[in-house]
């Protein structure tokens, strides 16, 4: 590696968050997973360094010695070297494994700058918390250009669920395939939608409390949809104690949905899963 280059640097696992993930919000960063023992790595490395230097800070190059940093290699599922990943705004955007020619490398570098759809997506992510309406508009524009962008699909669905636009959110979530990197969040959002649809809302709370098991199930859904998780779970357990059949059906189904919302292996899910199991024994 060129000692004088200001745009090429070695990185360790301890430094990765600061030097790569955070820095990638300023410029795309190429991560070169390599090892001195690997002949193709020794060929590719200098070419990557030269092409990075030629771009004068438009892109940076981080070098990871997989023998010295096996944890990073494992985290990025590196099964062969050289393995090159480009990261922008904290996300991996494109990668390749093995030695490729310079023409292909030029194409790789060209893909590091965001296209219009990607710019709209990144702007939507930035606007989610401060201006949801703007974020929704930007997500829609991004999806119009790239309809199969799962990141934009889940982002838009997340905002629509928050605005209780249930039909459109549900339709979007159907587009997220199983075993996808977004599957867990999609399941969480589906669970929230289910709770919103099955809960009658806070306005009916006084009446619902006067009902027996099914009424308490309705109340549990309403509380969960409002984010009152612990109160919702306690209410559902009360419903189950009143009626065994309801416990085995509605109570169990609703609590499982809530577990997806809070995290199926979260502390609260584990605690109430044990209580549900005890109730059903």
Image (tube, rainbow, N blue to C red):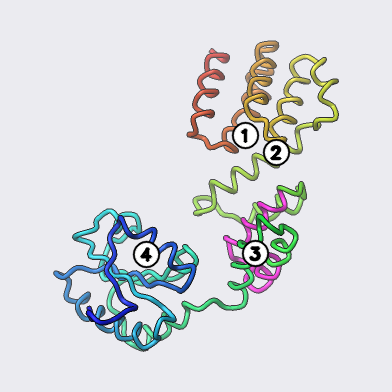
Estimate the x, y position of residue 152 in percent, counting from the top left: 62, 62
The numbered mark at residue 194 is 2
* The residue stretch that appears in magenta: 139-161
Tag 1 near tag 2, CB within 8 Å: yes
Instruction: Give whichever of discs 3 and 1 has the lower sequence position.
Output: 3
Disc 4 on helix, strand or loop?
helix
Estimate the x, y position of residue 36 in percent, counting from the top left: 16, 70
Disc 1 on helix, strand or loop?
helix
| Mark 4 neighbour density, 10 Å: few (under 14) some (14–19) many (20 or more) | some
| Mark 3 neighbour density, 10 Å: few (under 14) some (14–19) many (20 or more) | many
The mark closer to the camera, 2 or 3, is: 3
The numbered mark at residue 19 is 4
Instruction: Give whichever of discs 2 and 3 has the lower sequence position.
Output: 3
**Residue at the image point whose x is 47% and y is 63% from the top:** 91
The mark closer to the camera, 1 or 4, is: 4
Tag 3 near tag 1, CB within 8 Å: no
Disc 2 on helix, strand or loop?
helix
The numbered mark at residue 124 is 3
The mark closer to the camera, 4 or 2, is: 4
Disc 1 designates what residue? 257
**Residue at the image point whose x is 69% and y is 16% from the top:** 239
């Amino acid at each position: 590696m060129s000692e004088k280059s200001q745009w090429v640097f070695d990185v360790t696992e301890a430094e990765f968050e600061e030097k790569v993930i955070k820095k990638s919000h300023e410029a795309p960063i190429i991560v070169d997973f390599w090892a001195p023992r690997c002949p193709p790595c020794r060929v590719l490395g200098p070419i990557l360094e030269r092409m990075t230097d030629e771009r004068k800070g438009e892109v940076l190059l981080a070098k990871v010695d997989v023998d010295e940093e096996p944890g990073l290699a494992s985290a990025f599922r590196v099964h062969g070297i050289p393995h090159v990943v480009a990261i922008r705004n904290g996300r991996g955007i494109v990668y390749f494994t093995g030695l490729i020619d310079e023409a292909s490398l030029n194409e790789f570098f060209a893909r590091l700058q965001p296209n219009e759809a990607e710019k709209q997506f990144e702007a939507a992510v930035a606007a989610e918390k401060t201006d949801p309406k703007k974020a929704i508009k930007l997500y829609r524009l991004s999806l119009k250009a790239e309809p199969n962008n799962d990141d934009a699909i889940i982002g838009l669905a997340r905002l629509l669920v928050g605005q209780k636009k249930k039909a459109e959110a549900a339709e979007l979530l159907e587009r997220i395939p199983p075993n996808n990197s977004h599957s867990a969040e999609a399941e969480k959002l589906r669970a929230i939608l289910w709770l919103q649809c099955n809960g009658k809302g806070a306005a009916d709370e006084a009446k619902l409390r006067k009902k027996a098991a099914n009424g308490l199930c309705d109340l549990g859904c309403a509380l969960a949809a409002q984010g009152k998780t612990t109160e919702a779970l306690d209410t559902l357990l009360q419903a189950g104690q009143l009626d065994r059949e309801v416990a085995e059906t509605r109570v169990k189904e609703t609590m499982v949905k809530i577990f997806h919302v809070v995290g199926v292996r979260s502390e609260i899910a584990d605690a109430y899963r044990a209580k549900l199991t005890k109730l059903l024994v």
